[in-house]
Image (spheres, helix red, strand yellow):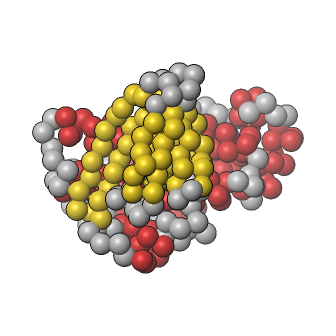
């Protein structure tokens, strides 16, 4: 279950500065010892690093991101057999609020680097290379978001740990290709399962069949487009994988009790004079 209280505390983290950087260490390079002053994310892209924290050693492999916490003594020893490239995001907080830092306790030392974490890091480096300063509100906000993203991704991984990899892969396919003409056989083939076995796995982990999940996701995306765009009903239907606007309208009515137009009007405070039916 999502920890809303912890998320709320982290979203209010009193950030005073955010720094970001990139560095390549030669084989056998070291750094430290030092006392960590910030909340720091270390994104290790190539090579490896053994990070000793308060006397305890942790191995960070290429493709992983680690969260380092203030007040700890650290020493880095990088790969002996090749260069190690890593980037970092260092978030300075105004005070060490026990409640806020407590939200980070119990999180794993490292997780795989996600596309989203790479995107935040790319944005920070680009903005800072273009003249933004560590104390700019945008830069501080991105630093806070990176910490919140790490915590969120840790929680998501914990939720998914008991789910079959084929189910997680199928969900990723659906989330990316839901507008395409997907069918059970296609999904099963892409996750290397027979349709029968795939249905059993998916129902066990998600409580619905793969195709039921697909249509639920299409409805979710369709409702979002109705709320937030001026696309016509037919255009929305087409963009979320419905073959006809009639089928889309019937499905929306079944899920919400309203027609697409009624749902759009009820869910948006803006004028609808420019919306197309």
Residue 7 against residue 39 in the figure, above or below:
below
Left or right, residue 74 beside residue 109: left
Left or right, residue 204 beside residue 37: right
- Is residue 17 visible to the viewer in this orientation of the structure? yes
Q: Residue at x 41, y 73 (%)?
A: 100
> Which quadrant: the N terminus?
bottom right
Task: Find residue 61 and report its horizontal and vertical position in percent.
Answer: 58, 36
Count of numbered badges drawn on the protein: 0
Q: Nearer the viewer, residue 73 or 246?
A: 73
Residue 194 is drawn in which quadrant?
A: top right
Task: Find residue 184 and report its horizontal and vertical position in percent.
Answer: 74, 37
Q: Nearer the viewer, residue 250 or 30?
A: 30
Task: Find residue 113 and report its horizontal and vertical position in percent.
Answer: 51, 41
Q: Residue at x 82, y 34 (%)?
A: 193
- Is residue 233 visible to the viewer in this orientation of the structure? no
Left or right, residue 20 beside residue 200: left
Q: Most extreme residue toward the top, as rendered?
A: 82
Residue 257 against residue 140 in the figure, above or below:
below
Q: Residue at x 15, y 44 (%)?
A: 132
Residue 34 against residue 59 in the figure, above or below:
below
Task: Find residue 17 and report its horizontal and vertical position in percent.
Answer: 23, 56
Q: Residue at x 30, y 72 (%)?
A: 95
Q: Nearer the viewer, residue 201 or 125?
A: 125
Left or right, residue 109 beside residue 193: left
Q: Nearer the viewer, residue 45 or 172?
A: 45
Q: Most extreme residue toward the left, as rendered?
A: 131
């Amino acid at each position: 279950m999502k920890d809303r209280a912890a998320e709320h505390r982290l979203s209010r983290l009193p950030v005073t500065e955010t720094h970001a950087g990139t560095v390549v260490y030669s084989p056998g390079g070291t750094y430290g010892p030092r006392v960590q002053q910030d909340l720091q994310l270390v994104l290790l892209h190539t090579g490896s690093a053994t990070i000793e924290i308060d006397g305890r050693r942790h191995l960070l492999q290429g493709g992983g991101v680690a969260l380092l916490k203030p007040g700890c003594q650290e020493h880095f020893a990088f790969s002996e057999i090749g260069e190690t490239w890593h980037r970092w995001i260092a978030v300075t907080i105004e005070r060490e609020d026990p409640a806020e830092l407590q939200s980070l306790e119990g999180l794993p030392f490292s997780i795989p680097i996600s596309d989203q974490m790479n995107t935040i890091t790319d944005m920070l480096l680009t903005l800072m290379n273009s003249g933004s300063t560590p104390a700019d509100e945008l830069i501080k906000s991105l630093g806070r978001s990176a910490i919140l993203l790490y915590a969120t991704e840790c929680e998501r991984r914990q939720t998914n740990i008991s789910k079959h990899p084929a189910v997680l892969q199928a969900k990723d396919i659906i989330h990316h290709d839901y507008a395409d003409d997907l069918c059970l056989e296609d999904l099963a083939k892409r996750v290397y399962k027979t349709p029968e076995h795939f249905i059993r796995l998916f129902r066990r982990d998600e409580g619905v069949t793969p195709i039921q999940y697909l249509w639920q996701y299409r409805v979710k995306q369709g409702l979002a487009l109705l709320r937030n765009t001026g696309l016509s009903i037919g255009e929305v239907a087409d963009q979320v994988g419905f073959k006809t606007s009639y089928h889309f309208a019937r499905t929306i009515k079944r899920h919400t009790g309203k027609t697409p137009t009624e749902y759009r009007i009820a869910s948006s405070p803006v004028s609808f004079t420019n919306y197309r039916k």
